[in-house]
Amino acid sequence: MQAAWSKHGLESAALCSDEQFLRRLTLDLLGRIPTLEERKEFLVDPNRTATINRLLAHDLFTKAWSENLTTQLFGYANDSADRDTLALWIDEQVRNARPYDAMVQELISATGQSAFVGPVNFLLRYPDEPVVKVSRAFLGVRLDCARCHDHPFDRWTQEDFARMNRFFEGMERQEISPGNIRLVDVARETSETDRPRFLTGAEPKTKQWRSEFGLFLIRSRPFARNFANRIWYHLVGRGIVHPIDDVSRDNPASLPELLNALAEEAIQSKFDIRHMIRLICNSKAYQLESFATLGDEERIKYFSISSIKPLTPEQWFDSMCVAMGQVPEPNQKAEFVRTFLGDALDGDFSSTWEYRETIQGLMSRLVESIDPPTSETKELFIRILGREPSADEMANWQTRPARDLCFVLLHSNEFAFNH
Amino acid sequence: MLIHATRRQFVSGSLGGLFAFAMKHRCDGLFAAEASRSTKRCIVLWMQGGPSQLETFDPKPGTITGGPTTAIKTSVPGIEIAANLPEIAKRMDSLSIIRSLTSPEGDHDRGSSFLHTGYPLVQALPRPTLGSIVSHENPQSDFPLFVSIGARGLGPAYMGPDHAPFAVENPIEAVRLINGLRKQRKSLRQLDEFSSKFDQQHFDSGLQRRQASMQRVERMLTTPFVKALDVEKASESDRARYGGTEFGQRCLLARRLLESGVKFVEVVQDGWDTHDDNFKNVGRLCGDIDRPWATLIDDLKSNGLWNETVVVWMGEFGRTPQINSGNGRDHFPNITPVVLGGGGIRGGHVVGKTNSTGLEIEDSLATVPDLFATLLTSLGIDPAHEFRTEFGAIAPASDHGKPIQDLIV
């Protein structure tokens, strides 16, 4: 990366401070800000590598990453399939360190009832033209354009789209009872010129179209690149190909060598999610300062400066609970996510780091009452922002009500972003 | 006159805001193209559940499929509608009926999505609802340009969260929200002051969006929008003219919002899924909407907004001509009734014709994309206009629909 930065004439930012690193890493790996105790412990022995390993083994890592995967794959709309059953299944896969390629193979080929078989709910969520979502989520390729016309800048044609989609045309939904749908495959007749065909030209040899599609998919190079790019994006805040699901000729990777190396690493490590995260979090690019101004776009593009990421509604909620010392009630989190996103629940949520709060969501949150967990100015800063107040801030806030300070800190951009 | 002044104030206010934003981010000119765009207003009266065409705008009295519903004459010679809507009948010269609209979508969610976006539902490719398109095609304002009354509304898809509907499920809650924010004004100023250091040190499009949202919340509190929202403050006579029903009060709120500068309002009336006891239920539902809808037309005419506002009445689909064993009617997307008027739409006209059994369309077949092309055209948006999705894919405003020329003045 140093070579790439020199080549583009960019200077890399300084490494971020320890407390900044801890907040960034804890949000990325556990989905919430660090607790007071975690912060204290880390500052006594600020060993970054050891902390990365410790958080990767934490129970909350599984929760945060499976939540995030579920949202990317499924979104929030819950009308056509069973989100909870899928989430439960993904949680189990992440907990057991199931290789990502095996997981995807199962998402593509699973059959059974939506109320019990978690992975069928992925395809049930996209009953029409599932290949649009599949190719975007797992190849980073957008076939959307090719469904209407041959892509002007790319090699995908309408026929490519139709043939890719054909792999899924044997799928049939059978309603067993309200809310429980069985996904099965039925044989479909095809002519020689009309058979399913993968983007690489491969055609199925058996009647197990979806299973064969899954194998074509996970053995392809774009799949490994997409996997590496997704994890990079999630941690660093910007894809090496960016946006992550728009791999095309007119949107090349900013650092192709880096992307290839990471894809190779993914294949060698057998698509081990934790291994990739460990690798990236230990890199210099992950640990840089995020101070930037207008004109720093090139530095952000080539990762010589850290990007900032808006907290997802889930991260926000869990962080707020940590900061305020609250134990959430059941459903409170789901309600918070709903308020935050307003009415945009039927949208696509495959790009995690878009700022998605609606104006109505923001308004609703600004009027919520706040109970300060302490009246100490310094402690409030540490609890909520993970840092001590500056001398100015101390002088400014010491005499003002804790409730006002709490409001300001919790709604501040410093809290709202992972930086 | 009053409205005129308010509107001018609104325009200058919002341009000033944009200018300040552009200056702050040293990108003057960024919004130049956006600021010059503008559309007409639109109000959609959404009949949740799928309204029966036979008990409203295409009655078949004296036939088996027509059931007990009778027809009445309207203010336009030759046009008859169901006796359930006497006040609307008197104003038929202002409205036009499409009797030949067909849709393939007989499921509530799919039908609702189709009639809100003009595109068949593909879950992996969400499309913006018409209100989000209208919001997007107007200069940004300090208050939401798209309001949904009585339901949460559909999402903005690639138009982004700034064009999501502002949902007023309950007007009293909305007013409570505004009053709550008024009390927080001092805190909001402190927040702004506190964030400035972080804001100066970071540069990110998401951060800019959040900053802009915060500023909008603060500025919204002094706009005519929040006054209009407080429907409890409407005059007694206004409230009485719209009737005591929930739908009536929603229509009154919609009128106030349109007057305050909101560009798109959807008013939802639930209960039209009349699988059971269709005739009694539709009779009651028509009773609920007849007067408020008529009053809305009268008011838009007297306040000068009629030619500026497209009025649409529709739902997910129509209902079966065959009457089921529960004396109800089931889903029938083959014929989906739509009524429209105002804003450059011809009044007193009927598009298309169904046969005597109400099962078949006999002429002027129209599709949902055609309806959307018509609405977009009358609102001042080119149906062929190509938007870009967040990833740069091309997305035409209408799914290859052709405007129904008979309806456009």
Image: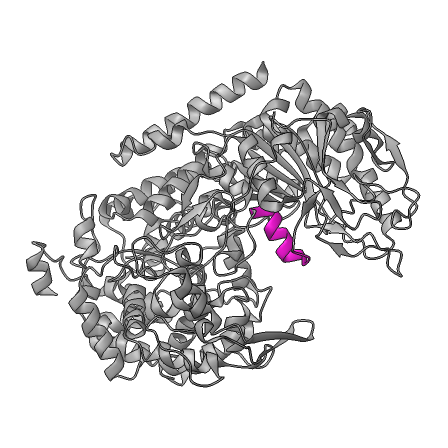
Above or below, comparing residue A268 to residue B74 in the picture: below
Taking the image as shown, residue A173 lies to the left or right of residue A135, namely: right
On the image, which quarter does residue A274 sit in? Answer: bottom left
Query: What secondary structure prevails in the magenta region?
Result: helix
Q: Nearer the viewer, residue B360 or B82?
A: B360
Above or below, comparing residue A270 to residue A297 in the picture: below
Q: Is residue B310 magenta?
A: no
Taking the image as shown, residue B153 lies to the left or right of residue A257, namely: right
Q: Quadrant of the N terminus of chain A?
A: bottom left
View extreme (front): residue = A192
Q: Is residue A171 visible?
A: yes
Q: Quadrant of the C terminus of chain A?
A: bottom left
On the image, which quarter does residue A308 sit in? Answer: bottom left
Instruction: Name the residue at 76% across, 53% down.
Output: B273
Q: Where residue B150 sits in the image (x, y, percent)?
A: 66, 45
Q: Nearer the viewer, residue B409 or A181?
A: B409
Q: Nearer the viewer, residue A6 or A247?
A: A247
Q: What segment is highlighted magenta in the picture?
A: B105-117
Q: Where residue B73 sits in the image (x, y, percent)?
A: 86, 29
On the image, which quarter does residue A188 sit in? Answer: bottom right
Taking the image as shown, residue B244 lies to the left or right of residue B36, namely: right
Q: Where residue A212 sits in the image (x, y, percent)?
A: 42, 82
Q: Nearer the viewer, residue B403 or A249?
A: B403
